[in-house]
Each structure stands twice: as structure tokens, then as C-alpha cells.
Image (cartoon, coloured by chain):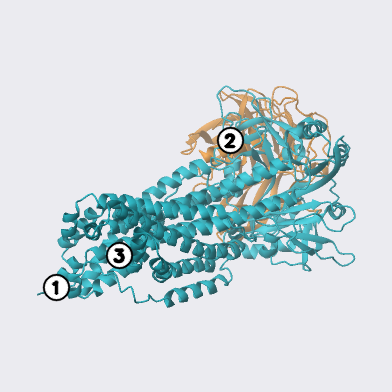
Chain colours: A orange, B cyan
Amino acid sequence: MADLTRRTLLTAAVPLAAAPAVAAAPAFAPVVPGRQLVFPRDHGAHPEFRTEWWYITGWLEENGAPLGFQVTFFRTRTGLGEDNPSRFAPRQVLFAHTALSDSRTGRLLHGQRIAREGFGLAEASTRDMDVVLDDWRLVRTPAGVLKTQATGEGFSLDLTLTPTQPLLLQGQEGFSRKGPRPGQASYYYSLPHLKVTGVLGRQGRRRQVRGQAWLDREWSSTLLDPSAVGWDWTGVNLDDGGALTAFRVRDARGRSLWTGGSLRTAEGRSWSAPNGAVAFDPGRTWKSPRTGAVYPVAPTVRMQTPQGERRWTLTPLFDDQELDSRPSGGPVYWEGAVRVPGGSGYLELTGYAAPLRL
Amino acid sequence: MPADPALPPTLLGWMVRGEWRANPVRTLVAVLAIAVGVALGFAVHLVNRSALAEFDSAVRSVSGSADIRIEAVTPAGFDEALYPRIARLPGLVAVSPVIEIAARTTAGDPLTVIGLDPLRASRVTPALAAASGPGSGMGFGSGSGRGVEDAVWLSPATGWRAEPGAGSATFEIREGGRRLVFPVAGGLPGVEAGRRIAVADIAAVQQKFDRVGRLTRLDVMLAPGLGPDAAAQEILAVLPPDARLVTPEAETRRTSDLSRAYRVNLGMLAMVALLTGGFLVFSAQSLSIARRRPAFALLRVLGLQRRGLFLQVLAEGASLGVLGAALGLAAGAGLAWGVLGLLGGDLGGGYFSGSQPVLEISPAWAAFHAGLGLAVAIAGSLFPALEAAGAPPAEALKAAGRSGDPERRPPLVPALVLGSVGLAAAFAPPVAGLPLFGYAAIALILAAGVAAMPWLARVMIAPLARMKAPVPVRLAAARLAGAPDQAAVALCGLVASAGLMAAMGLMVSSFRGSVDEWLVAILPADIYLRVAAAETSGLDPGLQAALAALPGVTGMESRRSLTLKLAPERPAVTLLAIPVPPGTSVPDLPWRRAPTTVGPGETPVWISEPLSRLYHLAPGDKLDLPLAGRSVRLRVAGVWRDYGRQFGALAVQRSDYVRLTGDTGANEAALTLSPDADRAEVLARVRGALPLDLAAQTEIAPAGEIRQAALKIFDRSFAVTYALEAVAVLVGVAGVAATVSAQTLARRREFGMLRHVGAGRGQILAMLALEGAFLGAVGAVAGLALGAAMGQVLIQVVNPQSFNWTMDTRWPWGLLGGLTLALTLASALTALLAGRSALSADAVRAVREDW
């Protein structure tokens, strides 16, 4: 009971799960096409928008055994306390998740942090990528190398992620539609094929690890159509140096409300998939014993490219990669390491436990 | 004949039951006396334990699982910049910033407003972060259209109840002249009953209560394995003067310190009641074995060993103890339950306000109190048992009662030794802040008085026997002088209870007199004004000037009174910033000693007597005070008497205070009126001059009214003490009555003889009444003398050592005289009543009767 009610308050405290309709809502900045993304400025936070994330997923190798990992930072403008002179005013809330997918554990090990922005304890720079949340951090050095630290249940990550390819601007030069209405969009860019080196601490032991990761950066004010309940997303580093991005926004009946994605070749030729050019065929499902949610954990992604249809069948590292981030105000979702023939990446399935609200 | 040391159980049972049946009243009184002692001790313990447990859990729910806390030393708080500095220290798992504000509800009840960052508090103080009820699901900016970022969650004690369908409830909070209305977001079921708490978002509290940039507390959770001491080193290095580190140990000590002296004093009173019970057992057993001497002698002749007889008498005493203890435990639990409901956890002492604790009974402590009762009963039987076992059987078979040789002077040396040791103990210092030696001195003086009774009875009665008087008087005097031991036995309980009553009476009268005098001294003005819950706000300078300029007001003193935490392990003290009358250099305070002057450039501080004793400060000492975020060095320049703030108070000159803090506000004011002013009219004008919201939380009262209210509170807090004492005295008188009547009934043969030699019935009754009166008077006089000595120990030793204040002795002549008269009359009346029943049988049968 106490736990439930605490969660209620916490959920209450974080608008991730809150309905977007706020009386006397502050003016969130709109996402409009044609805006030129500027770097390193746009690596930093955009506090005038409602939602923003820095989303790192990837594969590590520990003693030859493959591991999936995730380190994600979120920023939310609550629309609250905008005129409160207190430094505690909850105008911006930062939260972060980390998870480790180890097939020997058979489930996700995870960790989370949440705090309202302020006092240097929780801060997202607006000049370059530099997000601090207590002892967690994601920072981009002047040389363009990303460094991140995070801790979860029984593990800690201290990783250096070095870009090996240029930025990948999604949609139209970084303007990515997410729904049928013009405003339903985000600014979206990715950094695939990040080379990972660093240290994985597990139960007091520290081991050198290496691997490959993917950074997704997205910010928006009105992301989802009211009829949307969630989305499927995948980002795959192809072994030949190519990068596959595919997503679809679903309605309550499981139909695609909007789809998108991109395919970039090793040579850097990039093609952006228009709405309708991407399909997710469900394939095998897995039912969570904890939440009862049923996830299509091994979908086949079909993409109608100008060169014809391409298919990738995704195979999860293992089935139970469900993440319950409700204690820090997030949703229940499936976020797992997946393989495709000739590549590896991450699959994200949201809105299967309960309709997602952003 | 087998040398069995003890009687077979059957015979033992017969003898115990036979004795009870023979003397039901006396047995009952002894049992009751033990029961009263056990009940009082147990009840005081239970009440206090429950109150402390309740207080403790209240502290826990507010500080949660915090391992250590950083606290502001004043209600003004500390700069919030401390929060990130602490939060970044290594080894801290979570740091939850808190702003706490003492406010009032519309009804004027104290309300604690707690501002939290729920994201930080959820780990440290889940009870406060756990909100429920309609509205709690509506998060910050949720779908209902109403944000909860400026709403409050309320504890059950605030009276707010979640009502289904009750849409937009609001709650009004008053503080520092402000009236703030908050939407209600939900309830706080995790907060225990009795605590009035309103929780809101920290940013909203900072903004609405005008405390932006201030915090009052940081609750810190340490990494597992990191001890508070290790963390303390790191934290202390960054703490500003206006913040203080509090470890759980200091917190616990502070909580238990709050009422410790009061509680120990009550506990000791209960022990004294138990002691009185012990004397009554002694009386009862002495009489009982005196009556049964021939029966015991017969048993001895039949082969029962001395040891067997000794054990038999002890077993009889123990049976009284067992019964008394069982009764006492039940009565004590009942009493505690009733007291908790009626007076609250501090027995009306005012230490734990606004809480209703639940009774908690621990078997170990119940066993402890029962064991005490049993031990006292056995101890009371020890001397009679020794005497019974020591009597030579042959002689005892013939003579019924051994009354002792009236010519042989009883020894005085034991009494003198006990008395001297007691006197010496009175001069010993306190143990762990408690006057344990003081109590030992009282017990020893009491024992000395009782031990001196045989000697004293003889000394006081002997002159009576020689005087020329009517026959009944001479008969009575001769009888008492002839059997002084019996008189002493009867007097034991009487002297003990009269002595204790007199001692308490003397102490309370001295205390009350001193408090009254002090009230007059600290309330020299005509009208006093106090803004509740406004330690950082209240009357601004403009308002102060407006009040001073009111028609009819000739003088006005503005004061700032605020709480200050001087030491983490001690309760907060009060800082008073008071003006110094023009033309003098010291404020008008009830000085304990004449104040001294301070050196040039030094700022004087005048400390209260309890503060001086608690913090070991004397005039001339330096004192560093955290004021407005920095440490200010002051020089102690005087000590004043204070009965209002047990944990200490400091006074500084208001101009110094304003200079050091920049705070020109005031939350108290004293107004002097022109002699011809209409008091009621001025009162109304003062109230009218205050802004409406401020007036609602301001108490305005004439000095006389405050004095009366203070004395009323004083009397109420001593009501429990009076009740305890009255019960002890009643038991004492009942014991005397039982003893006297038993002795009277035992003398039927003597009365028959007197009738035969020509004494009239009336003469015998008069003789008995006079005997009783003599006994009562001797007991009362001896008891009062003893009481005077014990009272002085209470005044000079126990009070200063436990409450850190002194008082002047004031003799309650009326009470002492009345007590003497009442005891004399009660004793005479009992003897008379017993005599009437003893004389009802005819004289011939009486002479033949062999008991």
C-alpha cells in the first residue's frame, strides 16, 4: 500500500505519465520543419521543449560473452513553477535509466535516478552534451568523444564512446514526423557505430569491456497523436558499416499510425523512409510474468527502399528484457539487445503494458 | 522428630489463611499499600514509555530512515547553498532537503508545515512522501487541470478527511501574520495519529512562506557500512555556524531529556509510596506476630526450627506482596490508560504536545514493578520474622505480647547514623543529571525518622505520664508510656506518610511562591502581546511604532523571541532580544545575582539559571551564538531566574540583536498604559491596530491574566503530584486505623479489668480517644519535622539537580497545621470506634477472654 501510494506521488511528480492537457499550459516550443540543427549546441539540452532524451544502447563483450546495455537520460519540462523564484521550482525534471542484458542472468539488471533540475546536482547543459544526475553523467568532450557513468543493481558502467561515423540526421534533416498532424514531430538525430571502451563493475569486480553502441537524440513538445498507445523502434549497427533505423507508432488496435526510419550505407549514403515504407511483422511473442504484457520480441522489419523491399528478422539476446521504470516515473517497456543476420542493435517496444503517455 | 526446617505446605497455607481471616482489614490495608505503590510506579512508567515511544515514532516518521540530520539552529534556517555541498560529499546515498515551518491552523492549533522535494524524500522519508487519497493521483500538471505543485497533503490529526466526491477542498494555514489557502491534494496516512502535519512541495513552501533560499533541515542517508562518525567528519568541515549535525543518538537523548527529570521525579514519588507500603506491611506483620506469640511458641515446642518459623513469617509477607503486586499491576495499567486519555503522555507536564499515545505494556517492566512490590513486602516482614524466630519459646508461651521493658531506653544510634548518612548524601552531586543521591538522602532521612520513633515516642510521651490530669488522660499517657514499642509500631506508617506529605507540601508551596514572585517580576507592563508561529516575522517596525503611538499607551517594548539549538543533544533554548530601559545598561529581569558589566566592545548576554547550570556558564564566560548565519561572540553578564523555560533561555539587548542580525521585527510586545487609561478600551485599540490576518494569530492579554493562567498551569501540572501524595497519605491513615483498632481490640481483657476496678465506659472511651489523639499528634509532629528535613532536600538538592532552578523556602503553615489536626482527629476517631466495638462485650467475659 505504502509502496503503491509512493509510486502514485512519484508518478504525480513526474509528468512523463501525466496527460498533456494542462490548464494554463506554458508555451512549449513547437517542432517545425526546416530548422537547421547546429552542433555542438544541439547536443545540449533544449529546455523550452517538453521532452528530450539522450538514448544510448549497445552491445558489450565481457570475457567473450555478449551483453546488452542501455544508458538513457531524459529531460522533461513540467510546465510547473514557471514563475516561482525558488531554486527548487520543479520546472525541469531529469531522470535516467540504465540496464544490463546478460543472458546468464536471464533478466535485465537496472538502475535509475530522478531529480528536479537545480543546484548542479541535476543539470543538462544547453551548450553541449553534458547531463549530470547525481553520480550519473553523460558528457561530450571537446574532441567529440562521449563519456558516461551510471550505476544499477550490482553493476556500474564507466564507458567511453567514440564516434566512427558522422551524425545521422533522421527524417528531413533532423525533422522527424511522428504522427498524421504536422505538429506531431521531433528533432531527431543518431550516432550509430560508436566504438565503446571502458569498465564494467559487477559485484565489486571491475573488468575492461569493449563493444559497439548507438546514440539516439530526440526532443519534442507534441510527440504522439492522441490515438497512439505506443511505438516499436529499432536501431541496428550493420556489420558492413551500415545503420538501420525503423519505427512505427501504434494505435490501440495495433495498427501503424505512422512509420519512419532510415537506412545509411557504409559509404554514408542515407535514405529516409517516408510514412508507410516501414512495417513490423509481429513474429514470436513473449508474455511478461510480472506485468502480463505480451511483447512481439522477434519481429521482422520490412522496409520498402527505392532498391526494393528489404527484410531483417530480429532475434532477442533473450526474451525477458522488460524494464519497469515506474519507480522513477517512467513506463513499463521492453528494451532489449537484438541480433539480425549481419548486424546487432536494440529493439524498443513501448505501450504494451499500458498506453504510453508522453 | 524430623528436623524439617519449614512447615508442610498445608499447614503454611492454613496459617496464612487463618491470619487473613482473623484480621481481614489489616491484611487488606497492607495489600492495598503495596498495590498503590506498585500501581503508581507502573503507571508512571507506562505512561512515559508510551509517550516516548509515540514521540520517537513521530520523530522517525518525520526524519524517516535518515541516518543523520543537518539541522538549522534557528527557525530562520540556513542558506540552501549548503544542500549541494552536502549532497556532493562521498558516501552519502541520498540527501533530502527540507524546509519546516511552525504554523497554526485556523483553529489556532500548532501545525508543522513540511516542504519536501518528493523525488529526494521518497528514499529518506517515505512516510511523508507517501500520499494518498483523492487527488494524489493527480500529479504535477496532471489531467485534472489542477496542478498539485502548490497543494498540501494533510495528516489525519489536522481533521481533514478524504471524502469521496468532495472535489476541490482547501486548507487554510496561518503563519507570521499571513493567511495562506492551499488546495488539498490528499492525506498522509503514514503519519501517526496526533501529529498535525501539512506536506507540500519545497518550492511552494519557500515561495508562499517567503523563505526562498532557506532550508531548515537536510535528511541524510549514508552508504551501507559508512558510520555516522566517519560521515560527520566530512560534513562538519563544510557546516556553517547556523547549521548543526544531529546523529540519531543525540536525537534520542534529546527526546528522552525532554521529560526525563519530570518522569524520574514522578517515578521516585511512586517508589516513596511503595516504601510507605513497606512500613505498613511492617506494622501489620509486627502486630500479627505479637498476637500469635503463644501459637508460634507452641509450634517451636512441637519441633519447628527457628529457620522454619522465620520462613513462615516471610512467606506470609510475600503472600501479601504477591497479592499487592498483582492488584497494583492491574490498577497501574488501568491508571495509565486513563491518564493517557485524560492528560496525555506527559501527565499534564506539557512536554509532548498534540499527541495521543497508545498504551504499550512490556512484560519485563511489569515483572520489574511486581518484583519491587514483592521485595518491599518481604523486607517489611524481615524484622518481625527475625523477632518471631528469636523469641524464647518458653517465655513466649506464657506472655501474650512482649511489650518491652518501659525502663529500657531504646537505642538512638541507628537513627543518628542513618540521619547523618542521609545528610551527607544530600550534599553529593547529581548522577547523570539526576538527583539520585538527593533521593537516597530522602529515603535515609525517612528511615532515620522511623528508626528514631521508639525513642522519640518515649521522649515525647514520658512528660505526659508525669503530669496531673483527669483519670482518662493519665490512663492514656501511662498506657502509651508503658508500651512504647507498640506505639512506635503504630506510628511508623503514620510518620512516613505524614513526613512525605509535609515534604511535598513544603516543596510545592516554595515552588509556587517563587514562581508567583517571578511572574510579577517578569511581567512589569500592563498588556502583553504575542504573535504565534512568527519567529521570523510578526510586527514590522511600522506596526511597532503604530502600537506605541496608540492613545493610552505610555510605553512599549518590542521583543523578538526565537528558539535556538545550542547543542545537538539538548532541546532548543529560547533567545530573547529585549530592550534595556533608558538610563540603565541591563534589562529588567528577575536577577539571581546582580549583573556584571562587560568590557568595551563586548556584547553582553544574560542567561537564565537553567541555561547557566545546563551549559556550565557563569558571568564573565564567553558564549558563541549562531546568529544570522555567523558565529557571534558574546560575554555572559548575568544570570536571571526563569521557571518558564526548563531547557534554558538567553537574553540579549534588542539593539545588539538588530545590529547583529538586521532583524528589526518583533513577535512580542509589552505595553505600559497611562494610569487613567481604560484597559479594555486600549486592548480593543491594540487589536484594531493590527492587520486582520495578524490579529487572528496574536494573543493579547493583561499581565494579571497571564499570571493567573501561568499559575493555573502550574497547579494543573502539580495536580498529579498532589493526587499521588493524597493517595499515599490515605493509605497511611488507613494503616494507622487498622493498627490502632487491632491493638484496641487486643486489649479487651485490659478494658474488662478497668471496668472491674470501677472505670466507667465513658472514661475508657475517653482514654482510648486520647491515646489515639496522642499517637496522632506525636506522629504528625514527628512526621512534620521529618517532612521539613526532606522538603529541604527536595528544594535545595532535588529541584536544582533535576530542573536546574532554585527556589526560596516558603512554609505552608496552613497545610502543616491542618495535617497535624487531621491526623490527630483521624487517629482519635479510629481508636474511639475500635474501642466502642471492643467494649460491646460484657466485662466478665472480657476478663476471661484469652486470645
Disc 2 from disc 1: Cα separation:
86 Å
Query: Percent position (x, y) of residue B377?
Result: 34, 62
Q: Is residue B763 visible?
A: yes
Q: Is residue A44 visible?
A: no
| Secondary element type, mark 3 | helix
| Secondary element type, mark 2 | helix
Q: Chain of mark 3?
A: B
Amino acid under disc 2: Thr
Amino acid under disc 3: Ser
Disc 2 from disc 3: Cα separation:
72 Å
Which mark, by number, is residue B369?
none
The local crowd at label 3, few if under 14, some if 14 to 19, many if 20 or more residues have their Cα within 10 Å, is many
How many numbered tags mark residues here? 3
Q: Which residue is mark 1?
A: B301
Amino acid under disc 1: Val
* B375 to B165, vertically: above or below: below
Instruction: Please state which of residues B374 and A229 is positioned toward the viewer in this rendering.
Output: B374
Q: Is residue B23 left or right of residue A261?
A: left
Which mark, by number, is residue A8?
2
Residue shown at 32% from the left, 59% from the top: B321
| Secondary element type, mark 1 | helix
Quarter-of-image position of residue B384: bottom left
Q: Chain of mark 1?
A: B
Q: Is residue B516 left or right of residue B272?
A: right
Q: Which residue is mark 3?
A: B286
Give the mark nearer the N terminus: 1 vs 3.
3
Query: Percent position (x, y) of residue A327?
Result: 58, 41
